[in-house]
Amino acid sequence: MNFTNRIGAAAVTCFAVGTGAAWAQEMDTLNVLIANERSTTFYGMHVATELGYFEDEGLEINWLASATTIPYVAFLSNGQADLVMFDSAQTMQAVDSGQPFTIIYEDMQFAPEALYVAAESDVQEIADLKGRTIGLVSDRDLAIARVALESAGLTLDDVSTAVVGEGGPTLANAFRRNTVDAVAGGATELNTIQSAGIEIRNITPPEVSENPANSFAIWNDRKEELRDPVERFLRAWSKGMEAGRLDIQMTAAIMSDAVPEQWQDLDVGYELANLSAYTLHEPMSEQRGALHPHLWERVQPSLLSVGEISQLHDVSTFLDDSFIAAANDYTMEELEADVAAWIEANGDRYAAVAR
């Protein structure tokens, strides 16, 4: 069922045989924690919701707040979350500490986290940051700073760091007042800085950015218990990501309603949407979410060298690709029809974000 015929289907009343009692199919609830539930970076979750893909799969999704100081792995271990999204450093730190979980779906192969400098800065590469100050959006961004510095033969001892917060004006003022020479943060922070009128450059080397940046993890003891609803979730997620790439103007219309603070400047909003759809979420394989063991092997030495992990790990111990086939059980023709129907039904919203 797609969203174009949902209203008619919802109007159908089914009756239990022999009782005459009305019943409705129960929805399964999944508790999911992703890296940032209020960002154009993860446009796919909003597109999937708008097009009804989670509902089609019989799912209600409880999106847990990503803004938390609690380690994400704790949400898995205590059962508060059924699925959690880890970046590569979080994954390897959890593996290193012996946590019994599995990565089942790679959402990104290009990290949204990076080091940014003002466009007019004399800093041209990571090595130029020696003796300077790096602003961290949060403590979590210390890892990307460590790894980026290590790529240039530097350590945190070679720079000063300060947590500056995630607000757009705050980040922009840190550049305007020259209190920082660079900022370590994600694509969302890039958007907020640019929305505040500051032009910036990404100086992160490709070898640092190209890694399994965000992946879905599941607790091992719950894997088979949750397999069916999780496969349905991943299929809806994949469809949302792919549908959003088919027409970026539709994605812009949906995201400008979902996170209007990132769309105050239409051009900046589109820049983030294009980065998210065609770089951060550009699949490296034919199957969306496919696992890439060589990337997990490649990311470990740098994490080891900066002390984020204590040893190298066999990737087969924490990767499981058995969910990928179900996550890709759809056709592009279905998605194209859904996108066309949404545009026809939402002409005013679509036109409002035209450029």
Image (cartoon, rainbow, N blue to C red):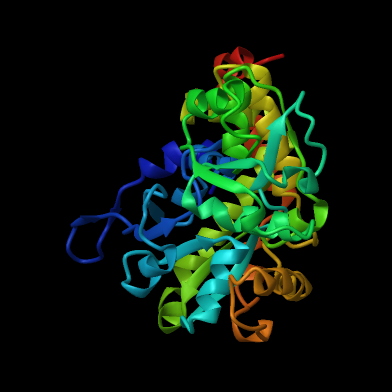
In front of the other: 148 or 93: 148
| Residue 273 sits above or below residue 322 on the image | above
| Residue 292 sits above or below residue 214 on the image | below
In screen coordinates, is 83 left or right of 120? left
Please tell me which residue is depicted at 31% across the width and 48% down the height of the picture.
Answer: 13
Please tell me which residue is depicted at 79% across the width and 30% down the height of the picture.
Answer: 122
In screen coordinates, is 256 left or right of 273? left
The location of residue 25, given as percent across then percent down, is 33, 58
Please tell me which residue is depicted at 38% across the width and 60% down the height of the picture.
Answer: 30
Q: Is residue 343 visible?
A: no
| Residue 322 sits above or below residue 42 on the image | below
In front of the other: 315 or 132: 132
In front of the other: 349 or 83: 83
In front of the other: 16 or 110: 110
Q: Which corner quadrant holds the C terminus? A: top right
Q: Is residue 96 visible?
A: yes
The location of residue 158, given as percent across then percent down, is 67, 53
Q: Which quadrant holds residue 47?
A: top right
| Residue 16 sits above or below residue 165 on the image | below
Q: Which quadrant holds residue 195?
A: top right
The location of residue 185, given as percent across then percent down, is 59, 43
Please tell me which residue is depicted at 73% across the width and 74% down the height of the picture.
Answer: 301
